[in-house]
Amino acid sequence: MLSFEHTWPYEKMMDDIYIQECPFCKEENVLTPMTKREFSEASEGIKTRLIMPCCHGKMTILNADSDYFWTEEPLRKQQKR
């Protein structure tokens, strides 16, 4: 099971997928180029690549739940315990 560091939140409005802040360049309110089909495949657990339009950073999505993309690489800084 992947840890929370491998997640990134998104918002779906109609058929558009927005990311509040790009994990790579920190650009705010990014409209992703993700198609309806790509989102559906990610939701089914099919590995999907998302290239951010703001900086061309690449994220490989392993799964998408109703709030988060679960990715191959850690996108958040690991919190110290």
Image: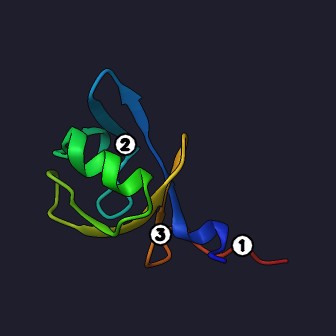
What amino acid is at disc 3? Leu
Please tell me the numbered disc located at residue 19: 2
Residue found at x 43% / y 77%: 72
In the image, farthest residue toward the top: 14
Q: Which mark sits nearer the N-terminus, 2 or 1? A: 2
In the image, farthest residue toward the right: 81
Q: Nearer the viewer, mark 1 or mark 3?
A: 3
Q: Residue 15 vs residue 21: left or right? A: left
Identify residue for label 1.
79
Q: Which mark sits nearer the N-terminus, 3 or 2? A: 2
Distance from Cα at disc 2 to Cα at disc 1: 22 Å
Residue 2, above or below 29: below
Q: Nearer the viewer, residue 39 or 76?
A: 39
Q: Secondary structure at mark 3?
A: loop
Please tell me the numbered disc located at residue 75: 3
Look at the numbered discs 1 and 3 and tell me whether their residues touch, using CB distance below 8 Å. no
Q: Residue 5 vs residue 62: left or right? A: right
Please tell me the numbered disc located at residue 64: none
Quarter of the image that includes the C terminus: bottom right
Residue found at x 50% / y 76%: 74
What amino acid is at disc 1? Gln
Residue found at x 31% / y 37%: 17
Query: x%, y% of residue 57?
Result: 22, 67
Disc 2 crowd rating (10 Å Cα; few below 14, some 14-19, many 20+) is some
Query: x%, y% of residue 22?
Result: 34, 53
Residue 41, above or below 66: below
